[in-house]
Image (cartoon, grey):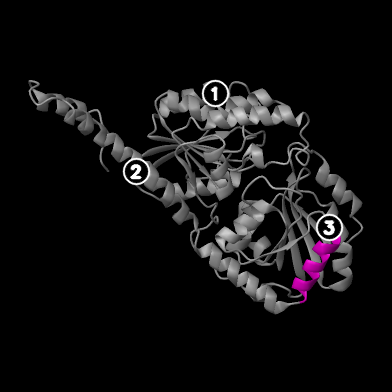
Amino acid sequence: MKICLVSAFPPSGRMLNEYGFHIARELQRDPLLSVTILADRFAGGEPELPDFDVRRVWDFNSLRNPSRLLRAIHEIQPDVVWYNLLFTTFGNAHNPVAAFFGTSMPALTRMAGYYTHVTLHHLIEHVDMKDGGIRHAHLYRSAGSLATRVLLMANSISVLLPAYRRTLLEKYRGENVHFRAHGILSGRPEFPDFSRRGNPEHRILALGHWGTYKRLERLMEAWQQVRAAVPEARLVIGGADHPMTPGYMDSVKAQHSHDPRIDFVGYVPEENIPKVFGTSTVLVMPYSSATGASGVAHQACEYGVPIISADIPDFREMGNDEGMAIDFYRVGDAGSLAEQLIALLQSPERQREMAEQNFSAALRQTMPQIIQQYLRAFNLHQKAKVLDPISRFRRIPSWIPKRSTIFRAALTKGVPWT
């Protein structure tokens, strides 16, 4: 089977590039698959990752992306075109036309004759426009609703929270909409080494694209209480600016440059992820809202790290559905966040209990398990395509001359059963 994966892809630093990498890596392990990544262009001079067939054919905020992608897909002639998408994958609020053109790509790909699947990481209905810094929110929601209807013109679509599937079924009357877990980004997670934590420091990890609904102000307020109550604590902040808030991280770093117990480590490349999580006592998610299942929370589960999060409905549902250990604090309340952090850092028993529960949750949703769910659906479509000529043949009246010859001619246009 030939699969085209359309996604941001390392060494590009755009959102979902890590998830695109792990999808591609897992697909590459199947010798029966041929995988081509149609990825975003980027300005840096870093070399491509080895062992991947990557074609950099589209640009962020470009109106030419539909023609470029369709041309590349036509050259490859895949059996499946798989889109790994946010509404802002191809453009942001500063260029909404490019963003809309990007979300129309799955429909255009299907109309061009290719089986098209979309993994959609968020829905407009579940996005807090104020936190996202969106002006003209009413207009943006209307455009987002239209874009969602266009996305549903793909052959099938997967979302990462049950609430998103309910929205697509009830509000949009969507068909072939599936819930599939985000999954951890590993096939064989290793049990956490607790000797690396709290020895001698308890590392509090915060990781993300900062500046919109992910902000650090409340965490910095809480940190003043935590550092007084837990002298061996250290705050580690990783990630980068959200595309809509350039300069945010530099401003926060400048405000707290005097504190030697705060480390700003910047964007964390894939090879450093195990060290960053493996030495952390807790992951904190100081968000004011959410735009879907949290990839960082799933990474914490992969490495058996306890989680403290703002009490946001999407995260509560994610934790309950997937059996995660998450302690919640009141949204926007620095005092509540400090209380949760101090209580956890002062309780080794609770740390171990939450770590083991999260690691157990990770074992139930490894990346091979998640990818196999997708591949079973793709194979089912392939087999249905093979059986289609047989179905048409059975409708031919038996008195038609050379009925068997017609059947053989139609069957040769199908695809192999395997």
Quick check: 378 left or right of 292?
left
Q: Is residue 69 above or below residue 241?
A: above
Q: Amino acid at mark 1?
A: Pro
Expressed as whole percent of the image width and height from the top left, the position of residue 404 reads 10, 28
User: Is most of the magenta stretch helix, strand or loop?
Assistant: helix
Residue 8 visible in this rendered orientation of the protein: yes
- For the residue pair 376 and 332, the one nearer the viewer reads as 332
Tell which circle, 1 or 3, labels the residue nearer the N-terminal end.
Answer: 1
Q: Amino acid at mark 2?
A: Asn
* Magenta residues (range): 334-346
Residue 270 magenta? no
User: 418 and 182: which one is in front?
Assistant: 182
Residue 266: percent from left, percent from top: 75, 50
Q: Mark 3 falls on what kind of element?
A: loop
Asked if the stretch drawn in magenta spans residue 335, the answer is yes
Name the spot of residue 54 as percent of width and height, x first. Answer: 50, 37
Q: Residue at left 56%, top 60%?
A: 322
Does label 3 or label 2 sit earlier along the sequence? 3
Amino acid bearing label 3: Asp
- Choose top left, top right, bottom left or bottom right for residue 227: bottom right
Which residue in the structure is indicated by mark 2?
A: 379
Q: Earlier in the sequence, mark 1 or mark 2?
A: 1
Per the image, the residue denoted by label 3 is 333
Can you identify the residue that label 1 sits on?
Answer: 66
